């Protein structure tokens, strides 16, 4: 059985099954409403049920009192519909609506997927969740006020662990620590979310080009997984560039996306392929591969993440192929050694 959930004052609506929370139904429909812990403990998702009825589920008394329930309030992270409902809550429409918060977190898992790339999986305290948009990043807070920025590589619907893709920078203060001294169960402090790199819904059905260089794949991965989760059917292409095959550290994952979703294609590109790579695919600069495949980009939307030189060249050359300036969205990675005191990835 499915119920209709209408949200006021925005007028948006979505469908929820009887065992699906109001929050999850909204997120599945691409609607962003406030939440924190997702388990009925913090009260961040509290709102009013204007019409209809809900099961309050595991809402905890300190977060939702009996008097608040009687007044029609509910915690949408654990409330499930018993009928069609109309709720009242604030939808997050802009990046400024999402609060920047500071958390301790535990290094839950470390996956070394290449000689110089580590996937970190971070776990927040039991009653906390980080609300963010795919494409945004967090800061790792270090001593003496230093911080390092890393894009979130997981989509918001999969927020049990936060995933970061860390490339080892020779002499890098934090990245050297990750590769030489960090252990699972270590504690870090993070702050976020930050950044304005995110999906922008087009006025028309523009095709999407994702352009990633190296670990610039991280936020692009989050965007693609978010689109897959929402069932987006717009044509999309991922161009992922690396120096050698090892740099395509999640090559199999990208191939699985391409095999499973007809609207999605994956074009890997190596700039310095060696004989050991036994590479028969595309070579050269990754944005040149886009130009070779697209003589007219006027009906496209581009999301690019990588080194500043790649971003600048793509912006210039794609504009010459007709891409509107307001349809190019980018995040440029910079890297810092141990003497730097600015955010870097």
Image: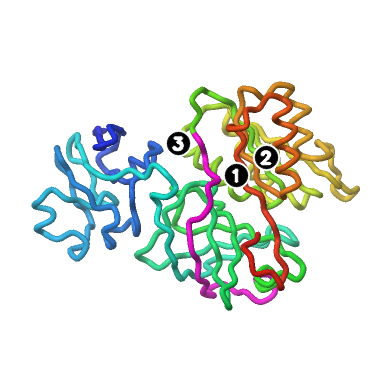
Name the one closer to the observer, 183 or 296: 296
CA distance for labels 2 and 3: 21 Å
Which residue is under mark 3?
230
Q: Which residues are magenta?
A: 178-200
Figure label count: 3
Return the x and y of residue 123 as percentages of the image width and height: 47, 65
Can you see residue 11? Answer: yes
Q: Residue at x 75, y 51 (%)?
A: 247
Can you see residue 264? Answer: no
Q: Residue at x 72, y 64 (%)?
A: 168
Name the one closer to the observer, 291 or 177: 291
Which residue is under mark 1?
220
Q: Which quarter of the rendered picture does the N terminus lie within?
A: top left
The first of marks 2 and 1 along the sequence is 2
Which residue is under mark 2?
211
CA distance for labels 3 and 1: 15 Å
Return the x and y of residue 97 as percentages of the image width and height: 38, 49
Query: For the residues carrying marks 3 and 1, which lies nearer the camera in this image?
Result: 1
Question: Answer yes or no: do the residues labelled 2 and 1 have beta carbons within 8 Å?
Answer: yes
Q: Is 170 a magenta residue?
A: no
Return the x and y of residue 292 as percentages of the image width and height: 78, 27
277 shown above or below 125: above
């Amino acid at each position: 059985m499915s119920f209709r959930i209408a949200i006021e004052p925005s007028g948006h609506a979505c469908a929820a099954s009887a065992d699906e929370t109001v929050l999850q139904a909204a997120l599945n429909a691409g609607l962003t409403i406030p939440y924190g812990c997702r388990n009925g403990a913090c009260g961040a998702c509290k709102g009013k049920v204007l019409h209809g009825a809900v099961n309050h589920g595991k809402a905890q008394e300190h977060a939702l009192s009996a008097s608040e329930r009687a007044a029609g309030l509910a915690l949408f992270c654990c409330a499930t519909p018993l009928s069609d409902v109309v709720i009242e809550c604030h939808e997050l429409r802009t990046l400024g609506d999402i609060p920047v918060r500071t958390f301790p977190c535990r290094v839950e898992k470390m996956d070394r997927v290449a000689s110089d790339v580590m996937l970190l999986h971070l776990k927040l305290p039991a009653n906390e969740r980080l609300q963010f948009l795919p494409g945004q990043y967090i800061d790792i807070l270090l001593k003496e006020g230093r911080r390092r920025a890393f894009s979130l590589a997981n989509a918001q619907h999969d927020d049990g662990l936060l995933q970061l893709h860390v490339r080892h920078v020779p002499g890098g203060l934090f990245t050297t620590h990750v590769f030489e001294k960090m252990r699972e169960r270590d504690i870090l402090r993070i702050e976020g979310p930050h950044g304005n790199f995110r999906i922008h819904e087009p006025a028309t059905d523009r095709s999407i080009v994702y352009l990633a260089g190296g670990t610039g794949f991280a936020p692009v991965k989050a965007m693609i997984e978010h689109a897959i989760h929402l069932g987006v059917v717009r044509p999309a292409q991922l161009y992922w560039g690396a120096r050698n095959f090892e740099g395509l550290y999640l090559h199999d994952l990208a191939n699985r996306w391409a095999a499973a979703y007809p609207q999605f294609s994956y074009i890997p590109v190596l700039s310095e392929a060696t004989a050991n790579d036994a590479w028969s695919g595309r070579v050269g600069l990754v944005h040149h591969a886009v130009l070779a495949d697209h003589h007219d980009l006027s009906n496209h939307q581009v999301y690019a993440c990588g080194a500043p030189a790649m971003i600048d060249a793509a912006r210039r050359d794609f504009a010459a192929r007709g891409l509107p300036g307001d349809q190019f969205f980018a995040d440029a990675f910079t890297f810092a050694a141990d003497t730097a005191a600015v955010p870097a990835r």
